[in-house]
């Protein structure tokens, strides 16, 4: 039986739901908006400074990592709020760990960004 959401998924329409998830996080999460604004600035700088192919790969990987972490963090927050709306230490711990994962990815992206762009800025001035 291939009807309902499961049937649609089997026919390859799962992509539609994935896109809906991306749009939901972008519209509802302030942090995701900040990540996207910073990612856009980094992409524009990368084009202006004509970074190498390898540097492009690293920049895209790091941007993808941060956006992915933010989406997983949001997903966990929503799941925890739904499953356990009350205050609970375990819920707090799960949310803290997920937020920590985003922080690690964001700090890593700042370090890599500095490693790629500072030498180019120094050479420019
Ligand atoms: N139900 C809960 N029980 C215990 N602690 C909680 C609970 N909900 C939130 N917290 C604590 O508050 C922090 C912030 O949680 P919240 O759900 O408000 O995330 P947020 O600040 O909206 O995160 P983001 O900015 O990524 O959306 C958590 O990391 C956790 O320490």
Image: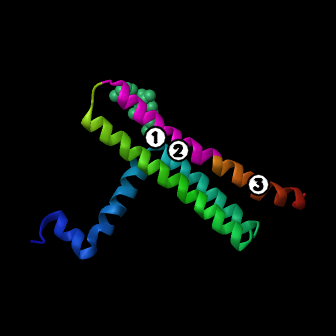
Identify whether 109 is placed above or below 44: above
**In terms of secondary structure, where does tag 2 sit?**
helix
Looking at marks 3 and 2 on the same chain, the residue that comes earlier in the sequence is marked by 2
Residue at x 9%, y 71% (from the top left corner): 1
Residue 97 among those drawn in magenta: yes
Distance of label 3 from label 2 (alpha carbons): 20 Å
Magenta range is 87-107
Distance of label 1 from label 2 (alpha carbons): 7 Å
Identify whether 61 is placed above or below 78: below
Question: Would you say the beta carbon of the disc 3 residue lies within 8 angstroms of ligand 1?
Answer: no
Question: Would you say the beta carbon of the disc 1 residue lies within 8 angstroms of ligand 1?
Answer: yes
Q: Residue furthest bottom?
A: 11
- Image coordinates of residue 92 in percent, x first then y, are 40, 29
Distance of label 1 from label 3 (alpha carbons): 26 Å
Question: Would you say the beta carbon of the disc 2 residue lies within 8 angstroms of ligand 1?
Answer: yes
Whether label 1 touches label 2, CB < 8 Å: yes
Q: Callout 3: 10 Å neighbours few (<14), some, many (20+)?
A: few
Label at residue 102: 2
Residue at x 71%, y 61% (from the top left corner): 45
**In terms of secondary structure, where does tag 3 sit?**
helix
Q: Callout 2: 10 Å neighbours few (<14), some, many (20+)?
A: many
Q: Quadrant of the C terminus?
A: bottom right
Q: Which residue is mark 3?
A: 115
- Image coordinates of residue 106 in percent, x first then y, are 60, 46
Residue 7 among those drawn in magenta: no
Q: Predominant secondary structure in magenta?
A: helix
Q: Which residue is mark 1?
A: 98
Looking at marks 1 and 3 on the same chain, the residue that comes earlier in the sequence is marked by 1
């Amino acid at each position: 039986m291939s009807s309902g959401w499961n049937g649609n998924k089997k026919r390859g329409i799962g992509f539609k739901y994935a896109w809906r998830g991306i749009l939901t996080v972008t519209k509802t999460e302030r942090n995701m908006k900040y990540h996207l604004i910073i990612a856009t600035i980094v992409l524009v700088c990368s084009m202006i400074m004509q970074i190498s192919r390898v540097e492009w790969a690293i920049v895209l990987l790091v941007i993808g990592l941060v956006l992915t972490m933010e989406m997983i963090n949001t997903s966990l927050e929503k799941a925890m709020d739904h499953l356990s709306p009350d205050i609970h230490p375990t819920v707090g711990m799960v949310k803290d760990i997920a937020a920590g994962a985003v922080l690690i990815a964001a700090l890593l992206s700042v370090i890599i960004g500095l490693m790629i762009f500072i030498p180019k800025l120094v050479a420019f001035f």
